[in-house]
């Protein structure tokens, strides 16, 4: 299953290139932020990530609630998503 999962923006290496480093449960990856160019991302923002793209900004409360709901799905859903996140890369 591929879900959109909340991740926190931890770095924006170059504001002119639509990429950001995000973290989910301590796992960091670079994701494409092309869809959010007009939203003005900043370190500490939360985004919904799906297949390597940040789809939308969300607030911290929504991020926490969504992560909790994913964990409640059971069947290792969260762990599977985290493993998929670890092995993906956007350059």
Image (cartoon, helix red, strand yellow):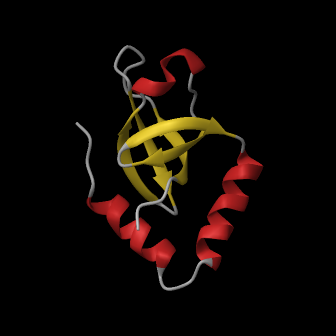
* Residue 11 % position (x, y): 46, 35
Q: Nearer the viewer, residue 59 or 72?
A: 72
Numbered marks: total: 0
Which quadrant does the C terminus fall into?
top left
Q: Is residue 78 above or below residue 58?
A: below
| Residue beneath the point at 48% across and 51% down | 23
Quarter of the rendering containing residue 52 = top left
Identify the residue at image location x=73%, y=51%. 62
What residue is shown at x 48% (from left), y 61% (from top)? 26
Looking at the image, can residue 45 be seen?
no
Q: Position of residue 69 (x, y in %)?
A: 67, 69
* Residue 85 x/y as whole percent: 36, 59
Report the side of 57 relative to 33 (left or right): right
In the rendered view, would you say 65 is above or below 40? Answer: below
Left or right position of 9 against 28: right
The vertical placement of 80 against 66, above or below, is: below
Residue at 44% of width from left, 29% of height from top?
Answer: 12
């Amino acid at each position: 299953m591929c879900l959109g999962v909340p991740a926190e923006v931890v770095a924006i290496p170059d504001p002119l290139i639509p990429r950001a480093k995000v973290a989910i449960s301590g796992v960091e990856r670079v994701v494409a932020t092309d869809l959010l160019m007009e939203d003005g991302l900043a370190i500490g923002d939360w985004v919904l990530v799906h297949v390597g793209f940040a789809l939308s900004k969300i607030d911290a409360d929504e991020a926490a609630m969504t992560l909790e709901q994913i964990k409640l799905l059971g069947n290792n859903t969260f762990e599977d998503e985290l493993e998929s996140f670890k092995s993906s890369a956007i350059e």
